[in-house]
Structure formats: C-alpha cells, structure tokens
Amino acid sequence: MINSPYIRKPASVQGVMLAVLTALIPAIIVYASQIAAVVLVNLAIATIAALAGEALVLKLRGRPLAPALSDLSAVVTAWLLALCFPPILPWWATVLGVLIAIIAVKHLYGGLGQNPFNPAMVAYCAMIVAFPALMSQWPAAGQLDFATQLGLVLGGARELDAITSATALDTIKTGLRTAGATVQSIMSQGGNFGLVSGRGWEWLAPAYALGGLYLLARGIITWHMPAAFLGTLAAISAAFWLTDPAHYASPLFHLASGGAMLGAFFIVTDPVSGATTPRGKLIFAACIALVAYIIRSFGAFPEGVAFAVLLLNICVPLIDMNTQPRVFGHRGDKAR
Amino acid sequence: MITRLFSFKGGVKPESHKNESSGTPILTAPLPKRLVIPLRQSIRSTARCLVEPGQKVLKGEHIGEGEGGLGTSVHASTSGTVVEIASYPMAHASGLETLSVVIEPDGEDRWIDHTSLDLRTVSREEALAWLRGCGIVGMGGAGFPTHVKLGGGRGIDTLVINGAECEPWITCDDRLMRERAPDVLSGAMILRELIGAKRVLVGIEDNKPEAIAAMQTAASGLGDDVAVVPVPTLYPAGGEKQLIRVLTGVEIPQGKLGTDFGVQCFNVGTANAVHRAIRFGEPLVSRVVTLTGNVARPGNYEVLLGTQVSELLALAGPKADTDRYIMGGPMMGTELQSLSVPVTKGTNCIIAASPALFPPPPPELPCIRCGACARACPADLQPFELYWFSRAKNFGKAQEYHLFDCIECGCCAFVCPSRIPLVDYYRFAKGEIWARERERQASDQARERFEFRNYRQEREKEEKAAKLAAKAAETRAKLAESGEAPAPPAEAEDPKKALVAAALARAKQQQAAVMPKNTDGLSADVQAEIADIEARREKLNPQDADKAP
C-alpha cells in the first residue's frame, strides 16, 4: 500500500541534473567560440566514458542500468571534468580521469548519493598529481586552429613550447619568483592577459556566473555557498592586495581566474559531498575559498580550488553536526 | 484590529483542486440503511456502551459514556433500533477494528428532547461537562476532546479559529464558513468566553475569498477584537502550530500545549458544533464531509456520523477507473482498507483516486542530499538526516535530530526529487521507538513488581516475627508479674532472634526459587544432552579436569 502523501511535485534527480547541464551551456559556448572548439569533442569523449564506466560498474554490482544511467549524474561529472581539464589533453587522459571519478570515487563508495568526496575534484587532483606535465599544458585562447587541437586530443605529437602557454594564475605565480617583478609588470608583459585575467579565458567567469544564476533561480542551489565562496575569496584577496598590490593580485583577478566561478556555482555546490545545513554551507564554502587562496598564493600549485574542496569534504560531517538549525518551537534551545 | 502576519519556514504549494467540490451548497445526505457508530470517537479513548441490541433509540440519545480523562459521550445519529454491538473496522491505516453500535434507522429521524444551555447561569466546569456530554471533539481530524482543551484555559490571550483548510481537494470548512458563518462565529464566541481570551483570530487561507467575505460580514458586529484574517495559501498553514505561528508569531514546541503560550486553537467545524451544543443542546451527530476526486458529482454533504463510506460514495458517483479511496486529504490522509468504515467526527473528506489523478510514485532513487526536503520542512527539521538515521535504525540519533517534532505533513516527500517515501521512514522509526519504549516500560514494571513482592514478603515475615517476639515478651512479663521465676535474659532474646533468622532464611530460599536459572525447567532429553556435553568437554580438557578440585 502507498501511504500519504499521495501527490508529488514533478521533481526528479534527472531534472536536477538536466538543470545543471543546462546551466553549463553558456560557458561551453564561450569556451568553444573564444578558447578552443575542441572542448566539444572532449565533452563528448567524457560523456561516453562516464556512461560506459557507470554501465560497467552497475553490471558488476548487479544493479539495474536504466535508472542510474538516465539520472544524468554521470554526465554532470563528465562535463565538469571536461571543463576542468586542459582542452588539449589527450583523449585517453580524459577517459582515465572520468573513469577515476565514476568508478573509484562514486561507485566504490556505493554509487549516487553515497560518495563523501566530489568525484570530479578527486579525479582532477589524481590527474594533476599523476600527469603534472599534461595537466599544465594550456593553449592561449584562440591560439590553435581546430585541426591542431583535434590532433593533440587524438594523440598527435606535442611540441609543447610552441603550442602552450601558462595560465594566468601560473604566469603570476612563476613571474613573482623573479626578483623585482610585480603583478603589474607581469600582467603588462606578453599578450596573455585580457582585462582582468587570462585573455579569452576570463570570459568563462561571467558565463559560469550566468549559469549559476539560472540554478539559483530554479532553486537547484541556494545562495549560501556561492555567496560565501566568492565573498570570502574576494575579501581575502582584497586584504592582501590592499596591503601589497605589487605582490598580490586583485580580487577581480582571483574571481575571474582558474576555477573560481566554476567552483562557486558548480563544484562547491555539489549536494552529495557538501555541507547541508544553511550555516554549514556558509562555513564549508568560505573555508574552501580560504584554503584555495592560500594554495594559490603560497602553495606549490597555481590553482587550489580542487584540493580545497577535498579538504573540506572531509570536514562535512563535523560541520553538519555542529550547525544543525534550530527546530520549530525550540527557540530557547542551545544551538548544536 | 490590524493583525501583523508572521510566517513559518518551509511549506509547499500543491495544486489546490478546491474548485471541483466548492461550487455547490452543502446537501443533506439521505438516511443510510444502517449506521455503524464506533464507540471510539475521541483520541485514545473508547466509550462504555449504554445500550443493548433490540433497544430503540432516538436521535441524539446517549449511547456511549466517555471514560477516562479523554473520554467524551457518543450519541445515536438518528432514531431507530440498535441491532448489534460488535467490532467493526474503523478508518485507520491498519484497518483496526473497534467496538461499534449498529443502528437500523426507523426513517423518522426523531430527535430526543434537548434544550439550550444558558452560559450565564452555569459555572465554567458545568459548561465543559455539557460539551463533554454532547460529544464535542476537534473536527480537524485528531479528535481531541474540546472540553479537555478548554479545561487548561487560564491566561489565554488569543483564541485562534482554524479555517485555513490547507489540504488540497478538501472544501468542507470552506462551505461551512460560506453558509454558516454566523453559527461558526457564535461557537467561536462561546469558546472565547469559556477560555477568557482577549481576542479572536479566524485564519482562512486566501484561496477562499467567498469564505473570507462571509466570515468578515458575520464578524462585523462582534467588535474590534474579533478579526477574520486571510493567510497566505501555503501548505501546511492549517496545521495548528503553523497557523498559530502565522497569526500570532508564537511557536509551540512539540509536546507543549497552546495554553502554556496564551493561545488556543479550534477548527471552524468544532466551533460550529459548540454553537449547536450550547445554543440548541444538540449533541454532535453529523458533520460536513467533502466527496471529491474521481467522481461524477463532487460536493459537500451533511452526513450522519456512522454512515458507511460505501453508502456515502453512491451520492457522488465514483467513476469506473477509481482504484482506491483516500480519507482526508492527499498530503496526510489514509487509504481506506475497506469501504464499510463509518464516517466519524474527524472525517473531513473522501477522495476517489484514479491512476490518472494520483499516479503511483516513480521508482525510488538514492538520496542526493540536495536539501529540498529541509527547505520544505515546516518544522525546520533536516528530513534527509532523519531518513538516513531511520533507514539505518539508528533511532537514538533520529531522536536527537528531533524525529518527534515531525508532524508528518508530507512536505518533504512531496518535493523529494529522488521520490523517497520519507514520511514512511519516520512513521517506521517512531513506531519502533514507541514499541521499544513500551517493552522497556513493561520489563521495568515487571522487575519493580518482583522486587516489591520480595520486599513485601520479607517485611511481612519480619513484622510477624516482631509480633511474636512482643507476644512472648508480654507472656514473660505476665509470668513475672504472677510471681514465676524470671527467665534468664539470654533466653529472652533467643526466640525473637531465632524467629527472625528463620524468616530471613525462608525468604532467601523463596527468592532463590523464584529467580530462574538458565538450566531450570529443561526437559529430560535436554538435560541428558547437557550431561553428555559436559562429559565430552571433560574428556577434551583433561588438564581442566585435573585442576578441578
């Protein structure tokens, strides 16, 4: 017998995932038109790898294929990875990364909803540790024609210096090691910088933000995490920048660079591996921004969002346990 | 009086489906062929039967006497003959049976003599007893006796009259307010007088403009401190605690009564019943029931309590593809196990359900912790955490996360994108916790009884011994008085000591006999088997045997 309630809102996991995919479309358009069209190929490769990997594990686990494959959660992971990876990453590396995310991080923990870590971020970190060279080869926006890009993705010879350049974060980081260099002097050299960050690349930030606003409007995500993440990142970077503008990049640079916007709206907000209470969400996202900034400015890696997310994933049970909201009628109770 | 509205967190907006049944006036349902009147009409209490089979009764005649603190009287809903007193299923998810009086109507529907009660001439207690005698209970569903709710009333500031009717499909309160607004308000004034409230707030969801208009018109002559307040349509705004929150800003915690916070809340149907009971002396024998859903003629009917659902449904004409019936609303109602169940004081609606109107839920997916349930929860709980704990049977943790603050309104399950029947998990967890609590209480009681029995036996023995010793001393004293040689003092102590020692030894022996050993009460076969095992064990462990003394 079915018990009450007998009516349900027409909501589904598939619907949620579809909204996330839809929200990524503006950024994909900017990426494909301004930076490297081959990202579309990468998205396709990642999608196929994710679905095939998920189907394989489901088969091994003796679970029905249709419900899990059609929930689109694997596709979301695949797309996020394809957008995080360098666009000229060889196809096999993309496949490997996606399989790590789907098989090791998602299904070995029990599948949808069970993984304590963000699958895309674990895979990203694993790849950056395993293939540091491949993972740091980024083309300048619009530098390569599509045939060259495709050739590289399909495993063509890589003449690295000719085809790649450092990302904006990387350029600043390595540039500052030279004596006498300032953020301003680095940014005024070379044509790799646009208005506030990497030329071409910086336009991804508003595109991700647009998608994020769509998710907010649809009620798929709440304001807490993006606000706390971006607010904290802006506040810390502003503090350092105002103290020493020669050696610390501006808040605007930090917000428009690397994975900040993608992270704020699509990575940090992963419901499965993130904090769930309103206060917990604020703490969780603010701490990610803090750790990410520390890694960016003082760590060994140019970008730190992925590592920060994983570090905070570990803290989620602690955060949730200690930020339980006040229950109706328990006004005087001690907050836990 | 201008009322500032408050809000509660969460809530959902399901399609209201009120128009189906709200357009037509309340019709009086024809006399049914028979009435099955359950003696259990108020919460947790079954009335004592006062009639016998074959007895003629009049409409409104007292047929069941309420027992215990939560008991209320039960009355015959029409005139006729009692044909049977037997257990019949009542409207409950489990199809529980309850003792019921079956009446065959004589068709005359003749009232017993009844007169109004002049509140000015009686004490408050007498008025409450009158309501108890009229069988007045909350008509919103829970069936809590009205006189009990009124009984706590000292220092009440606000009387809230609940006309929110937030569940989809149900329109009985809507029609009642449209058609009998003066009666409802008259009842509200009586309730107000009985609890001494300063102001009266009637909360009605703003999707019922006609009801609001009718009530406002009726309330216009009642003074400034009576207000009909439209509240935003947001399920579950009609939940008692939610409506009190919206109208007064007061949050009543789980397990507490409104009285403690200076607020008391009654349903509009209850107010109407109180009006009939006081002004006309009519006991509660009928109520308005909405028949809706997959039926040809949806509408509201004035139905005699005890009318079986099957007879009632004929009035609305269920369509061919109806596959089940829901009593109550679609958010909190229960599916009827049998159509022979009778209408009771808390029956507000019967919905004919078809797969088209109420499609079966799609398959359940894993929880993705999206938090949609937490945002919808009007009790500010974290439903997904409660779900994880209930699923893992981690009941302690579930209670720590305030499982019992859950009002089972269904908002969480309504919004869940993984279509998890969340409320089922909470019902399961609550049931398990109650069962364990009962078990624990039962074993505690048994242990206490046993310990007290031992104590009592020992005490009795000691008292007896002391009495005997006293008697012996008395005898000795008498003997001494009569000139006999006094007994040596050592000897004088002896019989008393011996008696006490014997009593203690007996008590010990008895205690040993009562305390079961796990080898007691075994059959000969089993004992032989145990002996065998012991023998084998000794053979296997000769060193143990050697060590043994």
Image (cartoon, rainbow, N blue to C red):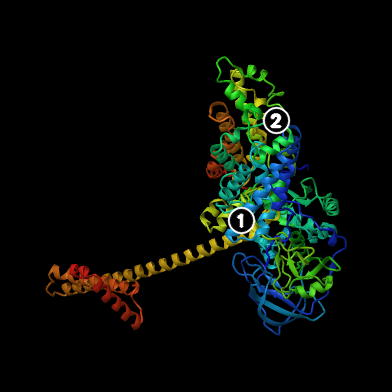
Mark 2 crowd level (few <14, some 14–19, many ≥20, 10 Å Cα): many
The residue beneath circle 2 is: A201
Mark 1 neighbour class, 10 Å CA radius: few under 14, some 14 to 19, many 20 or more: some
- The image position of residue B549, as x and y in percent, is 17, 69
> Under tag 1, what secondary structure?
helix
Q: Is residue B529 above or below residue B406?
A: below
The amino acid at mark 1 is: Leu
Q: Position of residue B508 (x, y in %)?
A: 28, 71
Residue B365 x/y as whole percent: 65, 57
Residue B526 in view in this figure: yes
Q: Which picture quadrant has residue B97?
A: bottom right
In front here: B485 or B235?
B235
Q: Is residue A289 left or right of residue B282?
A: left
Find the residue positioned furthest to the front. A157
Residue at 63% over, 71% down: B46
Give me the chain letter of mark 1. Answer: A
Question: Looking at the image, which residue sits at the far bottom?
Answer: B54
Q: Position of residue A212 (x, y in %)?
A: 71, 38
Label 2: which secondary element: helix
Q: Quadrant of the N terminus of chain A?
A: bottom right
Q: Amino acid at mark 2?
A: Trp
Chain that bears disc 2: A
The residue under label 1 is: A56
Disc nearer the start of the sequence (1/2): 1
Quadrant showing the C terminus of chain A: top right
Observer-nearest residue: A296 or A323? A296
In whole angstroms, how far apart are the C-alphas of marks 1 and 2? 36 Å
Q: Nearer the viewer, mark 1 or mark 2?
A: 1
Position of B34 compared to B507: left or right? Answer: right
Up/down of B13 relative to B453, above or below? above
Give whichever of A251, B460 is nearer the camera: A251
